[in-house]
Image (tube, grey):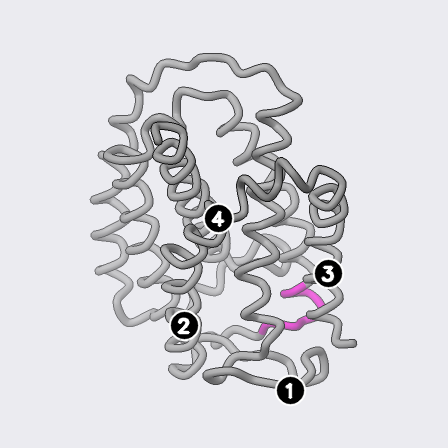
Amino acid sequence: MSKYLMINLVIVSFPLIFSIILYRYTLQKLSSFFLSFIVVGIPFIIWDVFATGRGDWSFNPSYVNGVKFFGLPYEEILFFVTVPFASLFLFESLRYFVFDTYISNRYRIVFLILSPLFFFSGLYFIFTPYTSTVLLVTSFTCLMLYLCFNFLLKSIHFYLYLFLTMLFFLIFNSLLTGIPVLLYSKNSILNIRFGTIPVEDFFYNFSLLVLYLGVYELINRKNLKK
């Protein structure tokens, strides 16, 4: 078993075990998760395919099994299932166990301001591929928070979700970049790191998990109306 697969299994093991225990509740949410994977996960995988082919990053052959789909190790594709599944399970757990507190979203204008800042920063770093792409995606994420996902900003659960997923990100991304499973081209990043983690990965994690949550919650809201 490759180390990357082991990391994926550790990430998903806890939520998977409790999903089996709470299978009735989980089944109600699975369709929302799979739809959010189609809307968010697949575009991120396509980005991954192009970025890997372009040489933005590569995978240490010592820590993957070598089975590839579209140039990606299957462990990398699993990452776009295990991490969002665990993160959305965490959000559902917060909603179940933590009393929600209403927060005014009048400060959502901040995301409208941040969106063009990230956009023009992405254009500025156009010749640093990963940096540029992730800043443009973050710009889109901020715009979505302002336009479509602003209901998230009203809930304390959202901020707890951001905080806790960031903690888990620091743990598991440190493993991926410290072992290292994932190798970055020096020409594709700014080479600013927190420990072993490139600064770009923080924006990547934020965008992936916020977009997943936003789409997931939009689908749940639509289902509730039905």
The quarter of the rendered structure image containing the N terminus is bottom right
Labels 3 & 2 near each other (Cβ < 8 A):
no
State the residue at coordinates (71%, 49%).
16
Q: Residues within 10 Å of mark 3 (few under 14, many from 20)?
A: some
Q: Earlier in the sequence, mark 3 or mark 1?
A: 3
Q: Which mark is residue 39?
A: none
Is residue 203 depicted above or below 60 in this figure? Answer: above
Alpha carbon distance from label 1 to label 2: 24 Å
Labels 1 & 2 near each other (Cβ < 8 A):
no
Q: Nearer the viewer, residue 188 or 112?
A: 112
Query: Which residue carries the number 1 mark?
Result: 66
Alpha carbon distance from label 4 to label 3: 22 Å
Percent position of residue 209, x then y: 48, 47
Percent position of residue 19, x then y: 69, 43
Q: Which mark is in front, 1 or 2?
A: 1
Q: Which mark is in front, 4 or 3?
A: 4
Q: As shown in the figure, which amino acid type bears the numbered disc 3?
A: Leu
Q: Residues within 10 Å of mark 1 (few under 14, many from 20)?
A: some
State the residue at coordinates (28%, 72%).
127
Alpha carbon distance from label 3 to label 1: 17 Å
Alpha carbon distance from label 4 to label 2: 36 Å
